[in-house]
Each structure stands twice: as C-alpha cells, then as structure tokens.
C-alpha cells in the first residue's frame, strides 16, 4: 500500500513540470509579447524616440521579443508538450543554447545602459550630465552590445552538440566552464548590477532634490511647482528602479542558486521522490527567470505617468481612426444607395 501511494505521488510530481511549462510558460509568452509590443509603441513615439534611454529600451524590447519567441517558446514545446526540437535538430540545439544566454544578457545590458543614461542625467556634476542623452552614442551601443556578447558566447554555437539524443556542451572542463559562466553572467550579475544602479540613481535624485532651495524673489507658486516636479520625478524613478531591482533579485538569485546546486549535486545519490521534487522546483525557477523581461512594460506603465499617457493616447488615436473609417464607410454606402451605379 505504501509503495502504491509513493508511486502515485511520484507520478503526480512527474506531471507537474509539464503543466508548469505549458500553463505558466504560455502565460509568460503572452504577457511578454504584449509587453514588448507596448514598449515598441511607446519608445518609438515622437515624444520618446529623441531620448537616448528610449533607444536603449526600444532595442531591449526587440531583444526580449526574440527571447520570448525563440528561447521561451522552444522551452514550452519541449518541456511542456514533449516536442524535442533541441534534441532532434543540431542547429536548433546550438542556436537555442546560444540564445538562452545571449538574449538574456543583451536585453539586460541594454536596459542597464538606459538606467546609466538616467543616472548621468541626474548627477550633480555638469561633466557627467553632458554624457547623458547622447543619441549618437546610443545608436552605436545598441549594435556594439549584442556584438560583444555574440563574441563572448559564440563558443556555444561551436561546442554544443547532441549526444545520445540530448543537447548539451562538450564534457569535461568546458562543461564546467560553461555552467559557471551562465551562473555568473545570466543570474548573479544582473541582480548585483540592478541593485547598484538603483542605489546610485536614488542617491543622485535625493541630492538633486535637496539642492533645490526656495528662492525669495520668485513667487511662491513657482517654487512650489519646481519642488513638486522634482518630487514627482524622484518618486517615479525610485519606484520604477526599486520594483525592477526587486524583480531582478527575486528572479535571478534563485536561478543562480539552482544552477550552482545542480552542478554540485550532479553526482549525489537521490531517491526518486527527491528527484521528482527537484524537477518541479527547477522548472519553476527557470520559468521565473523570464519574469524580469516580461514585466518591464507593466512596471513602467504603473510607475510612470508619461509612459501611461502615451499608451492611453495610442489607443485613443486608434479608436479615432476606426471611428473615422466607420463614418467614411457609412457615407460611401449612403452615396451608393441614393446614386446607384449601373
């Protein structure tokens, strides 16, 4: 009776990872694509596209779109529906394993440069502020950053292969190097970087706010409006950065711990039940690592009034266009009714 109960538990646990990848994976895929579309619409608008940070965030949205529609979708197909694309096709094996890190670090690096641009724009030193909103530099960096990461990660395209129907790295030293490279650059580094950038931006905004002192020869409403504007920027930027930092920590740190634990415990003796539980947590943690990329649009929408107004304005414009076309169609129909053509 005990063995039967244990077998039932194992069978249930074995089914959980597949269901997680299907339902949670599809949810992330839909939310991520909608977020990418929203970021593209906003950051290519007339208001935002003349800002350097918008160029970085627009490029990050393009990188995220690739990440969701190649890396995540192949995961859902293989880990959820059991369609073994990576294990059957060597080209998909190489490209997918390359894109797993390349899409991750390229998107995060572009996002980090957007934050650095805002960090420079709020610095107390004029010398540093001059480096903010460098449009030409931004256009160069959106090509340089993905290329640098391509050079650093091209080894995955070369040294990954399928063996016994499993896609993986060459065994030996390279396998360990590749595992710890992934731990460092696609999990630990983003969490640490986001925490540091968020802290310094918050510090700069606070210093800028305290440096604004009331000017006696200006009318009180003017001073009040200036102070209110700085306070509003303070609140929006710090809220956005704090939220993104928290999301980065919550999603990346467990991922780094899981990768490290998997490497250390690979040769340990484990029961079937323990392996089943570990599989559930591993799949859940891996899916959680996509949340940072899926939530950028929604965090900006909730914390930034200008971003929110631009999204709402886009939909109002689309409704006006549809309303105009509808009235044009009715007018044409009426003309054809009163003046039928032979």
Image: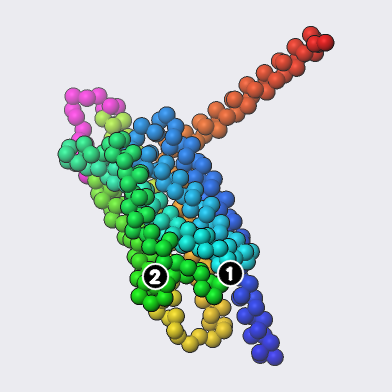
Identify whether 255 is placed above or below 240. below
Q: Nearer the viewer, residue 340 or 334?
A: 340
x 31%, y 41%: residue: 140
Tell me if residue 160 can be seen.
Answer: yes
**In this picture, which residue range is highlighted in magenta?**
206-222
Q: Which residue is mark 1?
A: 17
For label 2, the SS is: helix
For label 1, the SS is: helix
x 56%, y 72%: residue: 165
Image check: 241 left or right of 33? left
Mark 1: few, some, or many residues within 10 Å (few <14, many ≥20)? many
Marks 2/1 in contact by CB < 8 Å: the verdict is: no
Measured as percent of width and height from the top left, residue 3 is found at: 66, 89
x 40%, y 79%: residue: 264
x 59%, y 25%: residue: 320
Mark number displayed over residue 179: 2
Of callouts 2 and 1, which one flags the residue occurring earlier in the amino acid sequence? 1
């Amino acid at each position: 009776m005990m063995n039967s109960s244990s077998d039932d538990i194992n069978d249930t646990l074995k089914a959980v990872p597949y269901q997680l990848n299907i339902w949670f994976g599809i949810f992330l895929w839909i939310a991520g694509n909608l977020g990418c579309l929203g970021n593209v619409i906003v950051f290519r608008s007339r208001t935002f596209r003349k800002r350097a940070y918008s160029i970085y965030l627009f490029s990050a949205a393009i990188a995220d779109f690739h990440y969701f529609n190649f890396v995540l979708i192949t995961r859902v197909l293989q880990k959820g529906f059991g369609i073994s694309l990576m294990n059957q096709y060597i080209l998909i094996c190489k490209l997918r394993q390359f894109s797993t890190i390349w899409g991750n670090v390229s998107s995060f690096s572009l996002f980090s440069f957007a934050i650095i641009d805002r960090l420079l724009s709020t610095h107390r030193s004029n010398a540093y502020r001059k480096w903010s909103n460098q449009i030409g530099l931004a256009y160069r960096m959106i090509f340089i950053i993905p290329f640098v990461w391509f050079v650093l990660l091209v080894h995955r395209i070369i040294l990954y292969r399928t063996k016994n129907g499993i896609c993986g790295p060459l065994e030996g030293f390279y396998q360990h190097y590749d595992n710890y490279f992934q731990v460092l650059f696609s999990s630990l580094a983003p969490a640490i970087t986001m925490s540091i950038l968020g802290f310094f931006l918050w510090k700069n905004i606070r210093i800028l706010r305290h440096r604004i002192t009331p000017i006696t020869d200006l009318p009180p409403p003017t001073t009040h409006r200036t102070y209110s504007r700085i306070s509003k920027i303070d609140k929006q930027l710090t809220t956005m950065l704090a939220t993104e930092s928290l999301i980065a920590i919550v999603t990346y740190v467990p991922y780094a711990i899981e990768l490290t634990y998997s490497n250390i415990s690979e040769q340990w003796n484990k029961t079937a039940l323990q392996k089943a539980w570990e599989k559930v947590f591993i799949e859940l943690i891996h899916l959680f690592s996509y949340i940072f990329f899926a939530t950028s649009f929604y965090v900006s929408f909730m914390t930034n009034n200008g971003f929110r107004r631009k999204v709402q304005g886009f939909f109002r414009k689309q409704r006006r266009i549809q309303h105009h076309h509808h009235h044009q169609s009715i007018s044409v129909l009426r003309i054809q009714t009163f003046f039928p053509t032979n």
